[in-house]
Amino acid sequence: MDIVPVIDLLGGQVVHAKRGERDRYRPIESALTPGSAPQDIVAALLALQPFRACYVADLDAIRGNGDHRATVAALQARWPAVAFWIDAGLATPDDCRRWLDAGLRHLVIGSESQTDGTTLEAALALTGEDRVALSLDVRQGEALGPAALHEDAGRWPARVIAMTLDRVGSGEGPDLDRIAALAARRPGVRVWGAGGVRDAADLDALAAHGTDAVLVASALHDRRLDAGTLARFASETFAAGQEAAKG
């Protein structure tokens, strides 16, 4: 199971996301580094563990208030080996093209921003299945966006994100039942968990549920997940990959 750090961008800063209540987000206060500048936060996260991927939620873009394309493109240029997954309210094929033209190659299609499946299909055609994730967004038990994206597993790409917005930054633990339900709907799909991770015990529970990757923010910044725990999961992920290659 991969651990993928999350940075939420708002007004040029990294903010602390909590329960999807975006009007209340404030600049992050991290034990890893002072300040909230995106470059500093990413550098601190990568010093903690050489993560292979980073999830970037551009909250201004999601809310239709500009975007952070130049900022994220600079992050990608500085750390070319890191896959920066972009969640930026991509609602049209042209939205996808603009981010790809800026030098980003990994797109997240959030269900809350969709009216149908056109943008997901366009993203898959533009960049390929390995570089597209469908985020199935839920808030207070309500599926956000077109019902067909949530219900028709045949339309899903190989990677889906169980985004339970109520759990983000809540400290209530991950939504294990929902993750397991999505995995059962389409065997072989790579399910990423999002929201609620508190500690190593939650990571162990997620791994036991077959989670392919998990998005984490708060537990990294307040050091509830330390370097030793992260290294353990990284080594287990590497070992699993080696076994799969042999098979």
Image (tube, helix red, strand yellow):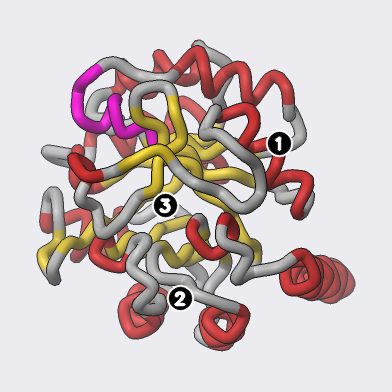
Query: Where, by quadrant of the figure, is residue 76 drawn?
Result: top right
* Image position, residue 164 (x, y; %): 29, 64
- Numbered badge on residue 217: none
Q: CA distance from mark 1 to mark 3?
A: 31 Å
Q: Amino acid at mark 1?
A: Ala
Is residue 64 magenta-colored?
yes
* Image position, residue 27 (x, y; %): 40, 38
Residue at 29% over, 25% down: 61
Q: Which residue position holds label 3? A: 157
Q: Is residue 244 visible from the viewing direction of this image?
A: no
Q: CA distance from mark 2 to mark 1?
A: 36 Å
Residue at 55% over, 29% down: 38
* Image position, residue 192 (x, y; %): 47, 63
Residue at 64% over, 31% down: 40
Q: Which residues are magenta?
A: 57-65
What SS does tag 2 mark?
loop
Q: Using a 10 Å C-alpha cutoff, classify the residue at mark 3 as few (fewer than 14 neighbours), some (14 to 19) or many (20 or more).
A: some
Q: CA distance from mark 2 to mark 3?
A: 12 Å
Is residue 115 magenta-colored?
no
* Image position, residue 107 (x, y; %): 45, 35
Relative to 82, residue 68 above or below: above
Counting residues from the start of the chain, the first of labels 2 and 3 encountered is 3
Q: Which residue position holds label 2? A: 187
Left or right? Give the position of 31 relative to 52: left
Q: Using a 10 Å C-alpha cutoff, classify the residue at mark 1 as few (fewer than 14 neighbours), some (14 to 19) or many (20 or more).
A: some
Residue at 22% over, 43% down: 22
Q: Amino acid at mark 3?
A: Pro
Q: Which residue position holds label 1? A: 43
Q: Quadrant of the N terminus?
A: bottom right
